[in-house]
Image: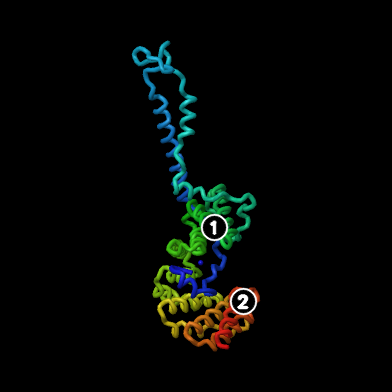
Amino acid sequence: MEKGSAAVAEDRRGQRPSRGGSGAGRGGSSAGSRSGGSSSRGGQRSDSRGGSGRSGDSRGTSGGRPTSGGKPSGGKRPDRSQERGFRGRSEQAPRTADQAAYDGPDLPEDITGAELDRGVRAQLKGLPEKLAARVARHLAAAGAFIDDDPELAYRHALAARARASRIAVVREAAGETAYAAGHYAEALAELRAAKRMNGATDYLPIMADCHRALGNPEQAIKLAKSPSVSNFSSEAKAEMTLVEAGARRDMGQLDAALRTLELAPLTSKSRQSWVVRLRYAYADTLEAAGRETDALSWFHRTHAIDSDQLTDAAARAEALERRQS
């Protein structure tokens, strides 16, 4: 959160792992706060010295008139403090890309940080109060924008990470928003960092899907076979199944992809989104394998429980029926 190429993106419709929502909208980095702040101050000092030096370049003149001994007439040097101040402000260097990333996008006034889950706010308590408040607002903004504007959400998460990069939930937010925005290498790096910090395995389906997007289906399958997957919830297991089946298809192993999906609870009576997506992936793979009659049946079974219209199962079924008639 499709990948590496348009062809891969097309055959993953309805199969992309859910972000789960556990981390979106969190972030900030205390180490980044210190380094970013000192960099900004250093730039201002440099500009101030440069402005002062330039304002004194007209040595030996006073209002453009020659003076004796290089000193202004009347024995007094003109007061150029106002000129120095003006030039220092007007010639201040523009913000660098790193500084702009540290600043982050403007924060909407109605986002206060109180929107965050209590557990997320608890992880920020080790930060100074004002820093924690800023990080919380960027995290909350990331969560608010991740569905409608994932790139903006990612920039908010980066601003949070710049201020609190040693907090796991911040790296998780950066990873999830990077995934949503299509920055798969960055997402993988951030989620690996979060996993090292807190040992959580919730990120494995997204990490596996990032490997798919980066053209490494073998690595995706390797993660899908991790022992921890057996302890996943039904929904998380379904997400990993979708990624593994997609990776098998990437490798041209349609029969293996079908076997992977057939081990999942396709006939569950649940109408939850993960069941809808499993059925859709199975129907889609059946059609890719040339089993159109079976595919038509499973597109209909998908549509029967897809009350939220998460997929285009009805349209796919109709297209198959026209082709068969």
Q: Where does residue 114 sit, x and y in percent of width and height?
A: 63, 55
Does residue 246 appear anywhere in the picture?
yes
Residue farthest left in this picture = 69
Q: Nearer the viewer, residue 139 or 314?
A: 314
Residue for point 35% across, 12% down: 68
Amino acid on which the number 1 mark rests in the picture: Ala
Numbered circle sitting on residue 179: none
Q: Where does residue 42 sit, x and y in percent of width and height?
A: 43, 39
Amino acid on which the number 2 mark rests in the picture: Gln
Tag 2 residue: 272
How far is mark 2 from mark 1, CA to CA? Answer: 27 Å
Marks 2 and 1 in Cβ contact (< 8 Å):
no
Q: Where does residue 230 sit, x and y in percent of width and height?
A: 49, 78
Q: Where does residue 66 sit, x and y in percent of width and height?
A: 38, 14
Residue farthest top in this picture = 74
Residue for point 43% across, 17% down: 63
191 relative position to 20: left or right: left
Label total for image: 2
* Image position of 287 with respect to 148: above or below: below
Q: Secondary structure at mark 2?
A: loop
Residue 116 position by quadrant = bottom right
Does residue 197 appear anywhere in the picture?
no
Tag 1 residue: 153
Q: Nearer the viewer, residue 46 or 197?
A: 46
Mark 1: few/some/many CA within 10 Å (<14, 14-19, 20+): many
Which sits earlier in the primary sequence, circle 2 or circle 1?
Answer: 1
Residue for point 54% across, 63% down: 23
Residue 64 position by quadrant = top left
How are the residues colored? rainbow
